[in-house]
Image (tube, rainbow, N blue to C red):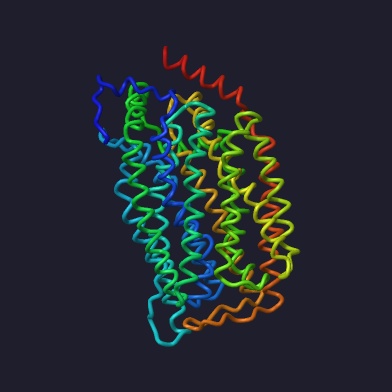
Amino acid sequence: MTKDFDDDGDLHKKSTSEKLDFPTKLAYGAGDLGPAITSNIAIFFLMVFFTNVAGIPAGLAGSILMIGKIWDAVNDPFVGLLTDRTKSRRWGRRLPWLLYGAIPFGLFFFLQWIVPQFSSVPNENIWPLFWYYVAIGVISQACFTVVNLPYTAMTPELTQDYDERTSLNSFRFTFSIGGSILSLVLSKVIFDHVADRQQQYVVLAAICTVISVLSLYWCVFGTRDRILAFEAKRLEREESESISFLEQIKIAFTNKPFLYVIAIYLFSWLGVQITASIIPYFVIYCMKLKESDVPTLMIAVQGTALLMLFVWSYLSRRIGKKLVYFFGMILWIIAAAGLFFLQPNQIGLMYLMAVMAGCGVSTAYLVPWSMMPDVIELDELQTGKRREGIFYGFMVLLQKFGLAFGLFLVGNSLQISGFKEAVPGQSILPIQPDSALLAIRIAVGPIPTVCLIVGLILTFFYPITREMHAEMLLKLEERRRS
């Protein structure tokens, strides 16, 4: 049960610096379950769905994903700014967006997996399908931003403790990686029991939609008390003066640690998402396995990532975020580089590399997101304002611009290399030329390896340490007391 607080009641007794209770952490973690499930299905299967089910050429498929990601990136800072300015005594700044955006988010995700028939002639159906998926993709990405960006901006509002934030993010990414694993298990079961390829994706999308919407409501009602407690304190200490959007951009991009965090996140997730989008092609065409083997391989990656999340979270409190990131990334770099050389008879080695990659993937989840609240506190120390929304908005904007470009390159590289898309309605997939197989291998190995190495170098130079953060919090506390 949730309850309203008045200004003179129990609300002021709920200190935002105290340890979070287990139900609050659990509810917060649940908020990432829906976005994780839908994103995971889209990352692994949407491009292969476009080429092997809808019959869209790889270049156009990559363009659909690029357009959706660019729009998703553009709307992020605006939604972030609007959430910073949202006023609701009953729900705070962030929760109204999750509450009212959950159902549209689920609906438009589902509509991406429908294949409308605009013409009985397959070639005449391609361009209408292209524009249908562009339109649905743009709306779907906007709905994703409406629920996910306010959610991510809640982290520093739930706790200001340096290590408690790492713990909170471990709950978040437990649900995130757990949701990814759940989506892969569901896809494996559905692919094995539903014969029609198009129907497989419709059933999978419907189940994931229901889970996603319900988990967002769990987050809203489970974190409401804590968010309202923070909101009351924030309103007490902040002035009513507003800062223009352009000034906020300037402030964000003069924050040096913020630039490091967005770059680390960008290169880490370029490695994740380029690999994820190309891995179904790698499994099917390079390793000569079935489509139903794709979820099994990715369960090995995500399952390892889930287990290692607790290990890395523990180690980060002992040795720091940087070293944890270094250890995980090195394992992942070795695995990514090795995928290029794998042959169809080396299935056991493929799964070993999947486990190694999973160790690194968990640090890509945990470390950059646990750095962001530190950046926001530095901004508050410098300006006297808290602008979680604008920082998270620009972080995700730049990340998505990079991902859009990466997906566009992957799709068009496949098309230039001579990749052959499937004919809609046919169960037999086409045989790919050697040039297309080489393009798949380059996309799954060398390209992610370079991205991860760049992220590793940037992390080495990240300036905020545990000691610096403790000093920042002391100064902030002194300012609030005065």
Instruction: Tell me where residue 337 appears, x and y as whole percent.
Output: 73, 56
Q: As displayed, is residue 76 above or below residue 432?
A: above
At x 51%, y 36%, the residue is 252
How many badges with numbers are in the image? 0
Image quarter where the C terminus lies is: top left
Q: Which quadrant of the view contains residue 117? A: bottom left
Residue extending farthest bottom: 121
Residue extending farthest top: 482
Horizontal side of 343 relative to 5 (left or right) equals right
In front of the other: 366 or 210: 210
In front of the other: 419 or 164: 164
Horizontal side of 276 relative to 186 (left or right) equals right
Q: As displayed, is residue 394 above or below residue 290?
A: above
Q: Which quadrant of the view contains residue 152? A: top left
Image quarter where the N terminus lies is: top left
Instruction: Tell me where residue 224 appears, x and y as whole percent.
Output: 32, 35
Residue extending farthest right: 341
Instruction: Tell me where residue 154 appears, x and y as whole percent.
Output: 42, 37
At x 40%, y 33%, the residue is 243
Instruction: Tell me where residue 357 appears, x and y as whole percent.
Output: 65, 52
In front of the other: 164 or 75: 164
Q: As displayed, is residue 286 above or below residue 5?
A: below
At x 50%, y 28%, the residue is 377
In front of the other: 481 or 191: 191
